[in-house]
């Protein structure tokens, strides 16, 4: 099996568009999705690396599993809906504590999805410059979460994690506004994150190469496989 | 209760069915009748009459509250046998008596405006209050008024309207064939099949009032019959489930369907956590935990309506050459990891094979209902089929209080017809279980299994080679060596004249009718020969099987009997292909070195392990419960 090099987790309240974001990024499409059950695991090739992505259910019903999905994560994408203030509040109330099991050097991104509902610029995908201007209809919904609020939450997350603001990634860089519907900023989000977690992949690989100590995890797996048909 | 078979039983057919006799007269039948009529006025498109003395109906004696609100004893001998000459063995029936018996009095002229509840019996029940609240809130009975909430809903473009946005005051809402409501004992709405729960909160309040009113007299409300509608109640722990159906299904069948809804809820939350939640907080809004699961319940109800598996409480597996089925089972058998308990392979939403942990088989058998719930979950969660899903799931009939962890993955993306389902008792086992899938994938690739599976399909009734036979459902009770295994049934594709959705439904309705006669609680039958308008049906139950057959309308009784003999012979011959005959087993002990011995681990070990697994699952449940409660 291709062993994933790094783990990325999507967290956030139900209906903010976690599955749609991932679907837009991997399938280049936007379609109606059904509320996710539990969590869904995806393996994404990023150059020579395997990135595992956990798309989790936002429903309270599955809350108990959240910390399991986050265990050992290198990046957590905290997703909210820009038209729903409560979805941002939920991140802090409900989801932040789940990230306690993530890696100590885990990076956090705050993503406000559904930006196409509030921002004209998000109605056009960035990579599609030639779209017809007729599609630029008026913005239907009131934006409830200004980006500044998300940035403030990002600072609070850093403090919660006991991370030094100066040595951490700046809020300016880690707060995104996206639209899974139009594709606005979606590639930027994932690619920025993958670029950022790359160092941690490399370091992990190096550690595995030079580490003189026995990796218990590795050992246990090997013994579990022993005697079975194939390895 | 069998309405169609009792042309004389109308008085009781239109009434209320309570499971224990009331010792005296109902203290406030008037109130009860009022709330019934209020419920009726919302639910049914025609007026349900409120029969109070002042406007008493011509054909009813004035003192006849009890003929509308009839209390039924559980004892079968209470049921009047009326003028039915059918023997318990066979029964000949005239055609169309099943679907044209609508001779009940049309009571269109006796409708009343229910708004003026002239309740002199003070201190009467909340029903009245609730009912009034309902009228004000939703403009029921007050023409031209509807709540602002609903108007917002109707302004939306129809394309975006789901069942949930339906206007619950509209006629179209009332005309749905089968409504299902779930509410808490505090009367809080939990689920409605059509329309939003918020808009229906007062309707559900009235339902709860009915339930608790009857309860206050130490009784349990079971059903209410009105013209064209049957209302069935089911109370399970802190949940109340109500079905309002205009299908002609029996009360038992409808209650069975409600039970499936209950089990589906349990499968998501477990019985223990639901009880705990409501012990803790009586008026908890369970929708908080079920939010997002409505589609799973919707899907279940659609399946219940269209798939006879639920009626027969049996599993329909995809016909497959036994050699292929065996090789698939072996692949599953080899790909194991500690704490894996079930490996299930599904194609086109039908079972291909199922392999179980050894101790699990000896302990309990897997109930068809649990498999139905799993299949429904897979169907309803296929939003994003490229991924591998990991989710907790409870099998309520196996153990209503514990979670399994289900790994769901499609083996043939992007078509996504072949699905692998692996159940583990270990919450953290995702990566180990995913590794099992990798092995299964490899083995299937090596044996070219996917393309063989793709060729498998359901069969045509013409293969049986019996003219006049249009369709059948056969459920054996004793597949040899299989009596403790999964109950299965086999059935060909529904072909012309049952190709359209309406015709399929009509045939299923006929089967449901036959089923209700066979399984009637008051007068069960062994054999029914039923000449309907456009087909002739024969249902037969023995100690060995249950069989439902559908023939062309011109078949003679003798012909049908011969045909059935031929059919039984054909099934016997095809048995290996039609059923999972010998479900294979494996043994997964917590110790990896033991698991490498495959299925050959010794008895003692695996028995201990089964117990351990059970304990472990309980532990996990506790942890989960704790997390649930930290929420509040």
Image (cartoon, coloured by chain):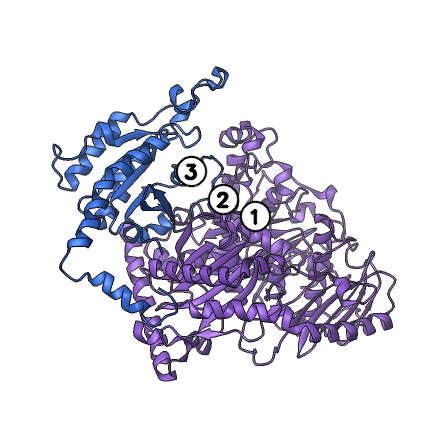
Chain colours: A blue, B purple
Q: Quadrant of residue A16?
A: top left
Left or right of residue B530, residue B185 in this image: left
Q: Are marks 3 and 2 in contact (CB under 8 Å)?
A: no
Label 1: few (<14), some (14–19) or many (≥20) C-alpha neighbours in 10 Å: many
- Chain identity of mark 3: A
SS for dot 3: helix
Residue B402 seen anywhere in this rendered image of the structure: yes
SS for dot 1: helix
Spatial CA span between label 3 and label 1: 46 Å
In the picture, the disc for residue B35 is 1
Q: What residue is shown at x 61% (from left), y 45% (from top)?
A: B43
Residue B116 percent location from the top left of the image: 58, 38
Q: Quadrant of residue B99?
A: bottom right
Residue B552 percent location from the top left of the image: 83, 61
In the picture, the disc for residue A20 is 3
SS for dot 2: helix
Please check whether the numbered discs 3 and 1 fall on a single chain: no
User: Badge 2 is on which residue?
Assistant: B130
Label 3: few (<14), some (14–19) or many (≥20) C-alpha neighbours in 10 Å: many
Spatial CA span between label 1 and label 2: 9 Å
Residue A56 seen anywhere in this rendered image of the structure: no
């Amino acid at each position: 099996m291709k062993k994933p090099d790094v783990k990325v987790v999507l967290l956030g309240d139900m209906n903010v568009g976690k599955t749609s974001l991932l679907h837009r990024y991997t399938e280049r499409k936007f379609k109606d999705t059904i509320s996710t059950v539990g969590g869904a695991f995806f393996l994404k090739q990023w150059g020579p690396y395997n990135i595992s992505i956990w798309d989790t259910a936002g429903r309270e019903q599955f809350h108990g599993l959240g910390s399991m999905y986050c265990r050992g994560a290198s990046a957590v994408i905290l997703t909210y809906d820009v038209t729903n203030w409560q979805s941002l509040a939920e991140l802090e109330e409900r989801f932040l504590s789940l990230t306690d099991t993530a890696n100590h050097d885990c990076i956090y991104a705050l993503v406000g999805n559904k930006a196409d509902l509030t921002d004209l610029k998000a109605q056009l995908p960035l990579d599609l410059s030639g779209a017809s201007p007729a599609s630029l209809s008026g913005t239907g919904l009131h934006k409830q979460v200004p980006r500044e609020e998300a940035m403030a939450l990002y600072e609070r997350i850093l403090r919660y994690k006991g991370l030094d603001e100066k040595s951490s990634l700046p809020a300016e860089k880690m707060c995104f506004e996206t639209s899974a519907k139009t594709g606005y900023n979606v590639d930027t989000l994932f690619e920025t994150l993958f670029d950022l977690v790359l160092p941690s992949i490399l370091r992990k690989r190096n550690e595995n190469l030079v580490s003189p100590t026995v990796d218990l995890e590795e050992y246990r797996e090997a013994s579990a496989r022993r005697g079975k048909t194939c390895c | 209760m069998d309405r169609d078979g009792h042309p004389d039983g109308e008085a009781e057919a239109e009434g209320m069915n309570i499971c224990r006799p009331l010792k005296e007269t109902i203290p406030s039948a008037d109130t009860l009748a009022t709330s019934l009529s209020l419920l009726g006025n919302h639910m049914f498109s025609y007026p349900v009459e409120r029969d109070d003395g002042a406007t008493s109906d011509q054909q009813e004696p004035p003192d006849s509250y009890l003929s509308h609100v009839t209390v039924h004893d559980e004892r079968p001998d209470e049921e009047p046998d009326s003028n039915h000459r059918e023997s318990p063995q066979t029964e000949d029936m005239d055609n169309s008596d099943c679907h044209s018996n609508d001779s009940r009095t049309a009571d269109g002229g006796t409708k009343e405006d229910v708004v003026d509840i002239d309740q002199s019996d003070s201190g009467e029940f909340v029903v009245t209050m609730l009912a009034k609240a309902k009228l004000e809130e939703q403009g029921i009975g007050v023409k031209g008024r509807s709540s602002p909430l609903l108007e917002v809903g109707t302004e939306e473009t129809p394309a975006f309207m789901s069942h949930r946005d339906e206007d619950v005051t509209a006629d179209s809402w009332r005309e749905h064939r089968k409504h299902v409501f779930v509410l808490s004992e505090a009367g809080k709405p939990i689920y409605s099949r059509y329309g939003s729960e918020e808009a229906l909160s007062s309707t559900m309040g009235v339902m709860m009032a009915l339930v608790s009113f009857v309860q206050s007299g130490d009784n349990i409300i079971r059903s209410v019959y009105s013209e064209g509608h049957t209302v069935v109640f089911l109370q399970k722990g802190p949940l109340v489930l109500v079905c309002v159906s205009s299908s002609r299904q029996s009360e038992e069948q409808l209650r069975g369907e409600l039970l499936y809804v209950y089990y589906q809820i349990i499968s998501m939350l477990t019985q223990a956590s639901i009880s705990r939640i409501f012990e803790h907080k009586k008026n908890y809004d369970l929708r908080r935990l079920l939010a997002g699961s409505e589609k799973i319940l919707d899907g279940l109800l659609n399946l219940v309506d269209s798939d006879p598996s639920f009626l027969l409480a049996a599993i329909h597996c995809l016909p497959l050459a036994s050699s292929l089925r065996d090789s698939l089972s072996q692949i599953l058998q080899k790909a194991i990891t500690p704490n894996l308990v079930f490996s299930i392979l599904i194609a086109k939403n039908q079972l291909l094979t199922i392999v179980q942990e050894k101790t699990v088989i000896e302990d309990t058998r897997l109930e068809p209902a649990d498999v139905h719930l799993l299949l429904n979950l897979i169907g309803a969660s296929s939003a994003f089929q490229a991924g591998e899903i990991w989710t907790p799931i409870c099998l309520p009939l196996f153990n209503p209080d514990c979670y399994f962890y289900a790994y769901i993955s499609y083996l043939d993306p992007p078509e996504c017809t072949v699905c692998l389902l692996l159940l583990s008792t270990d919450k953290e086992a995702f990566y180990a279980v995913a590794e099992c899938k990798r092995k299964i994938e490899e083995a299937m690739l090596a044996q070219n299994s996917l393309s063989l599976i793709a060729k498998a399909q359901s069969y045509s009734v013409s293969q049986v080679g019996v003219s006049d036979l249009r369709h059948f459902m056969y459920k054996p009770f004793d597949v040899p060596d299989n009596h403790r295994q999964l109950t299965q049934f086999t059935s060909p594709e529904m072909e012309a004249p049952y190709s359209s959705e309406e015709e399929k439904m009509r045939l299923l309705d006929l089967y449901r009718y036959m089923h209700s006669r066979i399984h009637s609680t008051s007068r069960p039958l062994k054999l029914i020969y039923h000449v309907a308008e456009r087909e002739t049906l024969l249902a037969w139950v023995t100690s060995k099987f249950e069989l439902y057959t559908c023939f062309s309308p011109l078949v003679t009784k003798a012909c049908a009997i011969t045909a059935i003999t031929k059919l039984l012979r054909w099934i016997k011959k095809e048995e290996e292909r039609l059923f999972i005959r010998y479900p294979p087993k494996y043994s997964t002990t917590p110790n990896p070195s033991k698991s490498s011995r495959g299925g050959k681990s010794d008895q003692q070990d695996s028995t201990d392990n089964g117990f351990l697994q059970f304990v472990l699952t309980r532990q996990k449940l506790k942890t989960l419960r704790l997390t649930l409660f930290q929420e509040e």
